[in-house]
Image (tube, coloured by chain):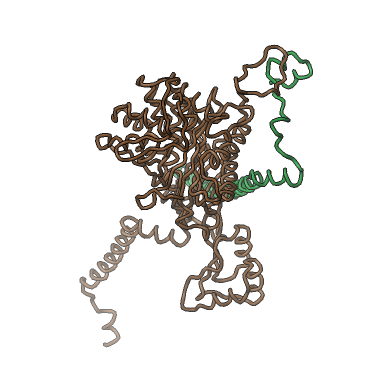
Amino acid sequence: MIKNEISQIKLSAWRSFLLFSLLVLGLVSLIARAAYLQGMHNDFLQEKGESRYSRVIEMNADRGMITDRNGQILAISSPIASIYADPKVVKITPEQLKQLSNLLETPATTIDDRIKKENSRFVYLKRQVVPDIAEKILKLKIQGIYSTHESKRYYPESEFAAHVLGFTDINDEGQEGVERGWQKILASELGSRRVIKDNKGRIIEDIEKIRLPKQGQDLILSIDRRIQYRAHAELKEAVKANKAKAGSIVVLDAQTGEILALTNLPVYNPNNRSTISNERIRNRALIDTFEPGSTLKPFTVAIAMEVGKVNANTVMQTSPGMMQVGRRTIRDVNNKGELTVAQVIQQSSNVGTAKIALSLAPQTMWEMFNRSGFGIPTNSGFPGEASGILRPYNTWRPIEQATMSYGHGISTSLMQLARAYTIFTSGGELKPISLLKQTMPVMGQRVISRDTALAMSHMLEMATKPGGTAPLAQINGYRVAGKTGTAHKLIDGQYAKKHYISTFVGFAPVSNPRLIIAVMMDEPSAGKYFGGAVAAPIFNKVMTSALRILNIPPDAPANNVVTFTAAPEMDDEG
Amino acid sequence: MFKLNIFFVVVLIACALGIVTSQHTARKLFMALENEKEIEQKLDVEWGRLQLEQSTLIMHGRIEHIAREHLNMMAPAASNIQIVSIDAAEDRPDLKSLLP
């Protein structure tokens, strides 16, 4: 009875239906899940999968190079490694420690100490290691020791071009000079990209560039490395010999206004950061202003000639070597008697210049100084450039107008002074200053006529001849022109009795000026302080070298010319 | 119909294998490219280093020192310089070779 019951049980239909629907439901949910993973959740999963073998790697980019006008390197970035350790992970055998200490040239005990700082997770073992050595260290395969890529900036000229170039900080950010002024152009940006690596660590596929690297642009300066070197070397010697507090030299191309050399003392070595101090960083030729003294006289005389008040042969009475203006007295070094205007410049007479100045309207004189660039920054691109002071003419009193004519009561940087002299070397045009190499002819701004410029150039030439204030500026074989300046230093608003600033600004060759050199010595205290005795000899040395370096033919040959056809044009005073 | 299907299956397999091989060659070539790029970078670094070295070697001060101290050279005084004008050189057969 019981046996038969089993085979005869009639299953109700809902049970098979339930089973069937459960199976279908399971299938549908599987399909849905698959569709979800494949379709909607796909991106996320693919990303997860890639992350097992994809890596983000850095793409290097270097800061731009700085070269001189002939393509010689003045600043270059070179890759360098830093070796660091993660003390928590480090496992090192005594044998490896010995090898590491040899490679790093660091005592094993020092390394050991650093590695054992257990509470930190990052410690530099040595910064700025040559890449070759870093590679060898990585080949030791010590667990927990790694290297990073950094770049180091090198300045092959060391201190010789320090003030022009400036330097960068540890983050490759320009701090001074060209490095700062042209930071945007020079700067590079690291890029990064995502790649797939295989099990051996080789890159097998590029997935995407996350950020493109930006290479820093190279910069070609107007500096001539050879002249820069010479200028700095001579300045160094002269500052030492004259026991001066500081000194500056600016060498300009007389036709284009390009800066061929620019140097100051004291200076620092950009490759050795410990030599950097505020006092040494100062790019004095551009940042510091001073009263230019007699170097300003040519501008006063030039405008008087331009408006027709005087000509080169007009006679001025400077006797008795002093002159009363209001309650103050203007003095010459000695009684020079009757002088022509040309001799006023040649012998640098304050009285003569003041008399010429007082015949001019203040506005005329102000306009001349203004158009010569005094009181206006040179826009050379250097950070922190000074503009100097030229007070508005409606505040001038007669005594001020008189003293300003010979460079007192007005302040200028050495660069502005050098720029102003381009008027006399380029036929009356003020040329803009530039620190970058110019490939096109440079347009200037006309200040005086060509005739006046030429006449002034001849007067300035007389100053370097016997009877002038700067015979020491004379160079054998070349016609040289220039003007000395000696000014009492302004200390706390008072003229200091025994502190002088000696200057000389000159150019050569006079027949076709190529170079302007401006020299400034701050507080020469070895006995001599006249611009003609202190600054002119430096001008002479630098100019002689520069003329030779640039292969500029002599325009006043002495009797050392091999000639058979016609005698060359000789200068009357040879 | 059956034959056509077989044919398509064969084509499909062939294409699949083709994809695999071409992917493989692509990766190989890519690795070679990466390798070359790495070499390029290394050469670039080397070039920079050499430039730096050259620039240090041709420093004016160094050359001047060598010229003066080791080679006993000096800049001629003005009295020791003979200036040859171009006109003069053209007339002299022995100087003509100096002309540009």
Q: What color is chain B drawn in?
A: green
Give the image location of residue A118, x and y in percent: 49, 79
The answer to whether B51 is drawn above or below residue A144 in the figure is above
Report the residue at 40% width, 35% height from top: A322
Task: Determine whether, in the image, residue A367 is placed left or right of residue A229.
Answer: left
The quadrant of the rendering that contains the C terminus of chain A is top right
Residue furthest top in the image: A565
A403, A540: nearer the viewer: A403
A109, A15: nearer the viewer: A109
Q: Which chain is brown?
A: A
Report the residue at 54% width, 28% height from top: A514
Give the image location of residue A545, x and y in percent: 62, 36
Give the image location of residue A392, x and y in percent: 27, 36
A448, A333: nearer the viewer: A333
Residue furthest right in the image: B94
The answer to whether A525 is drawn above or below residue A102 in the figure is above
Residue furthest front in the image: A320
